[in-house]
Amino acid sequence: MLNMRIYLDNCCFNRPFDNQSQIRIYIESQAKLYVQEQIRNAEIDLIWSYILDYENSFNPFEERQTVIQNWKYRAVADITENEEILKNARWLSTLGIKNKDALHIACAIEGKCEYFLTTDDIVLNKMKNYEGITVINPVNFVSISDK
């Protein structure tokens, strides 16, 4: 049986580096770390993309950049830009999704992901009724994937 495929956007990868004094951030961080453990154990397949490489290259903290970049080597696929991704991203941007976020989602779709994990409330709200992929917070993902 094939593992479920997931895509974590840049804000999700960065969540454990955020200030953990807020309970929401702490809980999202713990959920994201749990998802990472499932990836390490080959229970879930991670999909990577060129837009993750691009965004992470601007991370001003070298240690964080390296930690995040190392997840690329655990991914089962690395999605590169193509016309279909750009077309999907343009369409997603008509829903009010920012360009980089639209590219992330389009890459996840191209990678045949069932789930797109993000902590970005704007993306979560704008994509809640989209049928091409389930856009979900890591906390909610853990509650459904751990059954």
Image (tube, helix red, strand yellow):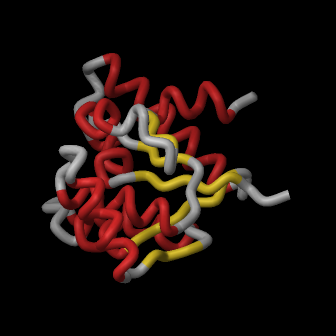
Q: Position of residue 133 (x, y in %)?
A: 51, 48
Residue 67 is drawn in which quadrant?
bottom left
When the figure is inspected, residue 96 is found, relative to residue 59, above or below; the finding is: above
When the figure is inspected, residue 88 is found, relative to residue 5, above or below; the finding is: below
Q: Quadrant of the N terminus?
A: bottom right
Identity of the residue furthest to the top in this view: 23
Q: Residue at x 26, y 65 (%)?
A: 56
When the figure is inspected, residue 81 is found, relative to residue 5, above or below; the finding is: below
Identity of the residue furthest to the right in this view: 1
Q: Residue at x 37, y 26 (%)?
A: 26
Q: Nearer the viewer, residue 105 or 32?
A: 105
Q: Position of residue 25 (x, y in %)?
A: 32, 27
Q: Nearer the viewer, residue 114 or 140?
A: 114
Q: Residue at x 64, y 59 (%)?
A: 45
Q: Position of residue 117 (x, y in %)?
A: 44, 44
Q: Quadrant of the C terminus?
A: top right
In this rendering, would 19 be left or right of 128? left
In this rendering, would 68 be left or right of 90? right
Q: Residue at x 55, y 53 (%)?
A: 6
- The image shows a total of numbered marks equal to 0
Residue 126 is drawn in which quadrant?
top left
Q: Position of residue 134 (x, y in %)?
A: 51, 41
